[in-house]
Image (cartoon, rainbow, N blue to C red):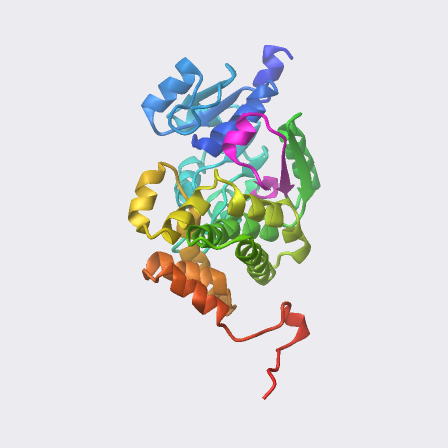
Amino acid sequence: MTSAAAAGNKVAVLGAGAWGTALAKVLADKGDPVQMYCRRPDLVAQINGEHVNGKYLPSAKLPDTLTASVDPEEVLHGASMVVFVAPSHATREVAKLVARKVPHDAPIVSATKGIENDSLTFIDEILAAELPGATHRHFSFLSGPSFAKELAAELPTGVVIASTDDRVRDHVMRRFHAPYMRTYASRDIPGVECGGAIKNVIAIAAGAADGLGFGHNTRAMLITRGLAEMVKLSLARGGEAITLAGLAGMGDLVLTCTGELSRNRTVGLELGKGRKLNDIVAGLGHVAEGVKTAHSAFDLAKKLGIELPIISEVYRVLYEDKPVLQAVKDLMSRELSAEFESLGAIKTPS
């Protein structure tokens, strides 16, 4: 590829955490010039000078074609694709910051998972509210079971790309596809977004059960019933149940509930061992999206009038200081019901 051709493929990555750096590395490994927006001058200097993100992804050697800048306008200049990958609580701020500079004719990819606390909106709704209308048809959403450290180590990984525009989705799929990263197509943005957000909350529950010393039975129950809550919320948003049987749902849920690299599972694990939330979060060094998302999902369920028992108990443990063991007992003692609501209520014999 000539330098002129490469310049025409520039990618702007808005966020320089572990996940943003791993995705930027995938694109840069393919030869595209990639520039990350990062607020920290010291980290920008390290990425540009030493080709490593020592704060968030120290294990990965970054390609020379991957650079960083504190100037969002510089990052966006000439970009043929824009990737939003800031934490969910910072996405609106970043979107407002770049709204006037984001290209109107380039694919815009969100790789952030979460629900904003105050507005109870998902990332697709935040971007639609803050970015110009001309950009909306170019939106796509990347999700799936993908630890940043493993992706950066080029371990085989599969993700799903959701967009309502076939051309945009196909373009983004090709841009991210690599020998160690396979992309799959979806049109179900609400389902993909819901799976990516809710799996973090369920992972806290699964980690807490592990911290209490419970076994594989408990973990399997929490994962499966957590999937049911994920589906229920997705359907309420207009999503499709089948989406949650795939990478963005069950795939990401299993990974986050069982993987030792999962920050959300780690939060639950330490809660189950009796540690306090503030101490746990302070020691992580990275964002655990599930802590904030638990609050949003709890409030959103109330707003929509749907019952999400596991999410509700995670919320009470995190924000009402409810003992973890009591939360488990309350979940197990709930009124008996059908596994799937279409079967109707269960009548207990008198």
In the foreground, 344 or 12: 344
| Viewer-proximal residue among 170 and 270 | 270
Quarter where residue 141 is shown: top right
Residue 138 shown in magenta: yes
Out of 322 and 54, give the one closest to the viewer: 322
Q: Is residue 200 rendered magenta in the image?
A: no
Residue 23, can we see it? no
Q: Residue at x 57, y 27 (%)?
A: 80
Residue 67 visible in the current orientation: yes
Work out whether 297 lies above or below 123. below
User: Could you tell me which residue is drawn at 49 percent across and 68 percent down?
Assistant: 332
Q: Position of residue 169 (x, y in %)?
A: 66, 38
Q: Position of residue 203 (x, y in %)?
A: 49, 50
Spot occupied by residue 309 in the image (x, y as percentages of width and height): 49, 65
Could you tell whether 324 is left or right of 310 in the image?
Answer: left
Residue range in magenta is 136-162
Q: Is residue 268 above or below residue 147?
A: below
The residue sitting at the bottom extreme is 350
The image shows residue 265 at horizontal and vertical percentages of 46, 46
Q: Quadrant of the C terminus?
A: bottom right
